Image (cartoon, rainbow, N blue to C red):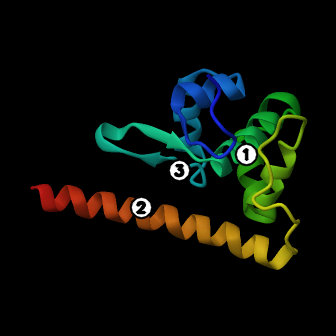
Amino acid sequence: MAKGPEAFRTISEAADELHVPQHVLRFWETKFAFIRPMKRAGGRRFYRPSDIAVLRGVRRLLHDEGYTIKGVQRLHREEGLRRLVSAGGEVGSAPPQSAAPSPAAPAVAHDGLHEALRDLETAKQRLDALLKG
């Protein structure tokens, strides 16, 4: 009963796929601002394929390559999400966003759009909570 490559993953599915406990994913959310899964009613997390690709890179850097949390934070700050995704590029990594490779500039803009979308989703959740009372 495997999901398709573009399907969103629950935290348990993401944890199984990445071979880490669920609490590790929650902990990484507190340490890495760029890890922001969608949250639905009741705070249930849903990880997009792009989230899984980033998490795969973080996991590999921390667990396989010996980076510290501060080291991964610095790598993200200096080289961006593309570097983290490429770190997880082992066999079985997330499929590319499109069939054809995109030039570097649009890919960087794409990462920025994902960040903006996540910020908007967070703002919407806060507004919805305020409207509910």
For image coordinates 23% across by 59% down, the residue present is: 128
Q: Residue 126, percent across and down?
A: 28, 59
Vertical placement of 129 versus 13: above or below?
below
Q: Residue 42, percent across and down?
A: 29, 38
Q: Is residue 108 left or right of residue 114?
A: right
Q: Earlier in the sequence, mark 2 or mark 1?
A: 1
Number of callouts = 3
Alpha carbon separation for disc pair 1 and 3: 13 Å
Vertical placement of 132 versus 115: above or below?
above
Quadrant occupied by the C terminus? bottom left
Quadrant occupied by the N terminus? top right
Mark 1 nearby-residue class (10 Å; few <14, some 14–19, many ≥20)? many
For image coordinates 86% across by 46% down, the residue present is: 87
Q: Is residue 40 left or right of residue 22?
A: left
- Residue topped by disc 2: 121
- Of the residues shown, which amino acid type is indicated by label 3? Arg
- Residue topped by disc 1: 53
Disc 2 or disc 3, which is closer to the eye?
2
